[in-house]
Image: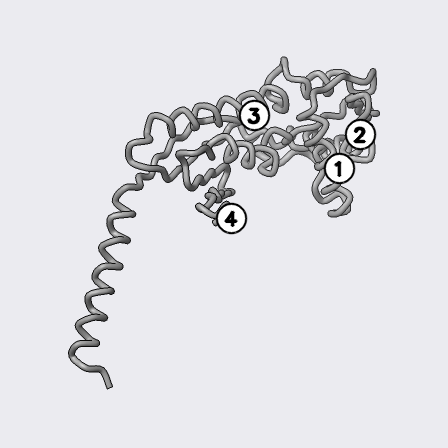
């Protein structure tokens, strides 16, 4: 049985709890920024102290700068990218590529093996046949069959020690590496997570990633 004193004390502590929670929430602000990159909208949201907007915006700039760097290395839509160079030299010679291309290609080959080729970055020549800007009807069956012969991830030669990439058949092309969410979003989040940002969320083409900062307590333990 609760006495009036017990009920009064309970109400007091509950009120104190909600006041503290409200005050803590009032000190945090949500910031967000978005840019069109890699043919899609990339958005970052961050939760930080209200007086840390300047530092949070700097973190956003660092994240987008890193993504732009990866795009310049991985995008097949940029003629000067290493991936475009690999496609131009399909069936001709190996091409030296940066570490980012090596890592993402290695992951793409792993996924291709796991899925039995259902995921295949050499599908690009086939995908070109469905260019909606130039076509109003599906491509003919013979065109599809001809390009399907070029789509086979097993014809990708990746030499990790030498950082070279080679497509065995002329006409082959790889694509979609720049849109690899596993490659892009962790980088974006890592760039945003500094001492002033407690939580970051990034979204790209409908995929969402979240990272919450682990803060050290006075005892040195991670919270």
Q: Are marks 1 and 3 in contact (CB under 8 Å)?
A: no
Residue 77 sits above or below residue 106 on the image:
above
Disc 4 vs disc 1: which is toward the camera?
4
Compare marks 3 and 2 and give the one earlier in the sequence. Answer: 3
Q: Are marks 3 and 4 in contact (CB under 8 Å)?
A: no
Callout 1: SS: helix
Q: Which mark is residue 156?
A: 2
**x%, y% of residue 109?**
75, 37
Count of labels in the image: 4
The residue pinned by badge 3 equals 134
Compare marks 4 and 2 and give the one earlier in the sequence. Answer: 2
Give the Cα distance between marks 1 and 3: 31 Å
Callout 2: SS: strand
Give the Cα distance between marks 4 and 1: 39 Å
Disc 1 vs disc 3: which is toward the camera?
1
Residue 98 quadrant? top right
Q: Residue at x 72, y 34 (%)?
A: 144
Q: Residue at x 82, y 20 (%)?
A: 91
In the picture as drawn, the residue positioned furthest to the bottom comes out as 1
Compare marks 4 and 1 and give the one earlier in the sequence. Answer: 1
Compare marks 1 and 2 and give the one earlier in the sequence. Answer: 1
**x%, y% of residue 189?**
50, 35
Give the Cα distance between marks 4 and 2: 46 Å
The residue pinned by badge 4 equals 221
Q: Is residue 26 left or right of residue 82?
A: left
**x%, y% of residue 175?**
66, 29
Q: Residues within 10 Å of mark 4 (few under 14, many from 20)?
A: few
Q: Which mark is residue 109?
A: 1
Q: Nearer the viewer, residue 131 or 166?
A: 166
Q: Residues within 10 Å of mark 1 (few under 14, many from 20)?
A: some
Disc 4 vs disc 2: which is toward the camera?
4
């Amino acid at each position: 049985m609760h006495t009036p004193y017990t009920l009064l004390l309970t109400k007091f502590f509950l009120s104190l709890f909600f006041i503290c929670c409200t005050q803590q929430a009032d000190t945090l602000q949500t910031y967000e920024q978005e840019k069109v990159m890699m043919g899609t909208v990339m958005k970052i949201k961050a939760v930080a102290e209200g007086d840390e907007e300047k530092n949070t915006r700097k973190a956003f700039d660092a994240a987008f700068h890193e993504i732009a760097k990866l795009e310049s290395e991985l995008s097949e839509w940029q003629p000067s990218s290493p991936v475009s160079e690999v496609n131009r030299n399909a069936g001709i010679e190996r091409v030296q590529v940066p570490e980012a291309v090596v890592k993402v290609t290695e992951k793409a080959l792993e996924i291709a093996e796991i899925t039995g080729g259902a995921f295949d970055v050499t599908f690009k020549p086939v995908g070109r046949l469905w260019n909606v800007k130039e076509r109003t009807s599906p491509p003919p069956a013979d065109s599809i069959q001809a390009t399907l012969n070029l789509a086979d991830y097993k014809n990708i030669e990746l030499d990790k020690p030498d950082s070279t990439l080679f497509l065995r058949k002329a006409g082959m092309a790889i694509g979609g590496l720049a849109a690899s969410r596993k490659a892009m979003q962790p980088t974006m989040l890592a760039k945003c997570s500094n001492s002033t940002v407690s939580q970051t969320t990034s979204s790209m083409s409908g995929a969402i990633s979240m990272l919450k900062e682990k803060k050290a307590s006075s005892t040195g333990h991670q919270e």
